[in-house]
Image: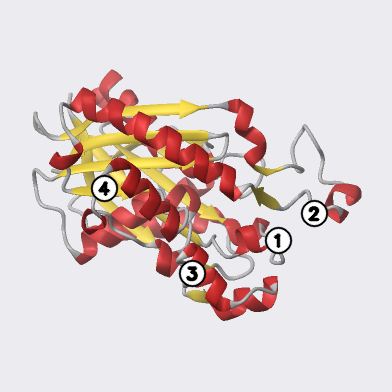
């Protein structure tokens, strides 16, 4: 059974955090932020907002522009690394907000690679059991809640956002042709929130040391991305029987504008085929690829038969790619 994307929607909070604000928080020049990252602004949710709320709003936008409705959802996979709480799954809280009842819903954490991981899992489940019908795959993150605002390496990059796609059966020749996932635990220390789990509790000492905040070794992550993304992309293109020249649009994880440009160059893809949301919204974590998909599709709609590539990298360290024909 061919499975493809049959609906897409995204949501970003209205509160804009510009580089002037980041400059004040982190003590770095606005020009440094713009030059080094290419990020000019990002969005933060209002205090008291939960990840499930952002996710639900993205799904509502999806159904507001789709002939499908929420009663047709038989599965929900929510990719996030900033859950509402340790348990239960944020997907179930989103399910409650959307009034979706009696169908499986669970979270998946592959950090910024989460959406491609979720897409792969949901596609496999639909193929294994077509009676599921349609599946929601949502990426949602609120990095503003785990950010050390004095850490210039991270606070300049990340924003809050959510995006969702609806998967369903499509005709032969369309849909997702191949996905490839990768993880390398030896790099787990490169992207982390050290305290707050069973390995290290977020006690007073951990909080005093700032170990409950998000940390990232950006240079090492970039080096990893430039090594692994071309490999997973080669795998999915080979399986799909495509070359880079066949691709109409390439969606690369929006870690920051400079990272996207470097990955595109490594893949041999002209930036004219690579949509960008990083300059306006920053890195929205697991929402990054579907958010950019929704933004690009809304600005210049994808056409039936367009060849599309997703390519991502994230904490873990993880990576993933997917090749699909738009329906």
Residue at the spot x=90%, y=51% of the render? 204
**Spot occupied by residue 32 in the image (x, y as percentages of width and height):** 56, 71
Q: Counting other residues with Cα less than 10 Å from the Cα at mark 1, is it few (<14), some (14-19), or many (20 or more)?
A: many
Separation of residues labelled 1 and 4 (CA atoms):
32 Å
Residue 290: image tag: none
Residue 250: image tag: 4
The residue beneath circle 2 is 210
Among the two numbered marks 2 and 1 on one chain, the one whose residue lies closer to the N terminus: 1
Q: Is residue 279 left or right of residue 30?
A: left
Q: Counting other residues with Cα less than 10 Å from the Cα at mark 2, is it few (<14), some (14-19), or many (20 or more)?
A: some
Among the two numbered marks 1 and 4 on one chain, the one whose residue lies closer to the N terminus: 1
**Spot occupied by residue 283 in the image (x, y as percentages of width and height):** 48, 57
Among the two numbered marks 2 and 4 on one chain, the one whose residue lies closer to the N terminus: 2
Residue at the spot x=67%, y=56% of the render? 146
Q: Which of label 2 and label 3 is nearer to you?
A: 3
The residue beneath circle 1 is 148
The residue beneath circle 3 is 35
Task: Check the picture and name the quadrant holding the N terminus.
Answer: top left
Residue 203 visible in rendering:
yes
């Amino acid at each position: 059974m061919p499975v493809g994307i049959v609906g897409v929607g995204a949501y970003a909070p209205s509160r804009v955090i510009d580089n002037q604000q980041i400059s004040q928080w982190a003590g770095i020049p606005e020009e440094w932020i713009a030059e080094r990252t290419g990020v000019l602004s990002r969005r933060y949710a209002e205090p008291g907002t939960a990840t499930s709320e952002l996710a639900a709003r993205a799904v509502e936008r999806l159904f507001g522009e789709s002939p499908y409705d929420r009663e047709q959802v038989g599965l929900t996979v929510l990719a996030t690394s900033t859950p509402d709480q340790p348990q239960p799954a944020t997907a179930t809280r989103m399910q409650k907000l959307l009034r979706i009842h009696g169908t499986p819903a669970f979270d998946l954490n592959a950090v910024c690679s989460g959406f491609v991981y979720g897409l792969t899992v949901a596609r496999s489940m639909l193929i294994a059991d077509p009676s599921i019908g349609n599946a929601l795959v949502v990426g949602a993150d609120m990095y503003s809640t785990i950010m050390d605002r004095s850490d210039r390496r991270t606070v300049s990059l990340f924003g809050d956002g959510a995006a969702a796609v609806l998967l369903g059966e499509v005709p032969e020749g369309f849909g997702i042709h191949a996905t490839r996932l990768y993880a390398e635990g030896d790099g787990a220390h490169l992207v982390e929130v050290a305290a707050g789990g069973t390995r290290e509790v977020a006690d007073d000492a951990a909080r005093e040391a700032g170990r409950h905040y998000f940390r990232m070794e950006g240079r090492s992550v970039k080096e990893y991305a430039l090594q692994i993304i071309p490999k997973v992309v080669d795998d999915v293109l080979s399986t799909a029987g495509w070359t880079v020249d066949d691709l109409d649009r390439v969606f690369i994880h929006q870690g920051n504008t400079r990272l996207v440009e470097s990955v595109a160059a490594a893949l041999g893809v002209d930036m004219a085929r690579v949509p960008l949301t990083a300059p306006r919204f920053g890195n929205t974590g697991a929402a990054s690829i579907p958010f950019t998909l929704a933004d690009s599709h809304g600005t210049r709609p994808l056409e039936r038969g367009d060849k599309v590539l997703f390519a991502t990298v994230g904490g873990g360290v993880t990576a993933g790619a997917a090749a699909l024909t738009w329906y």
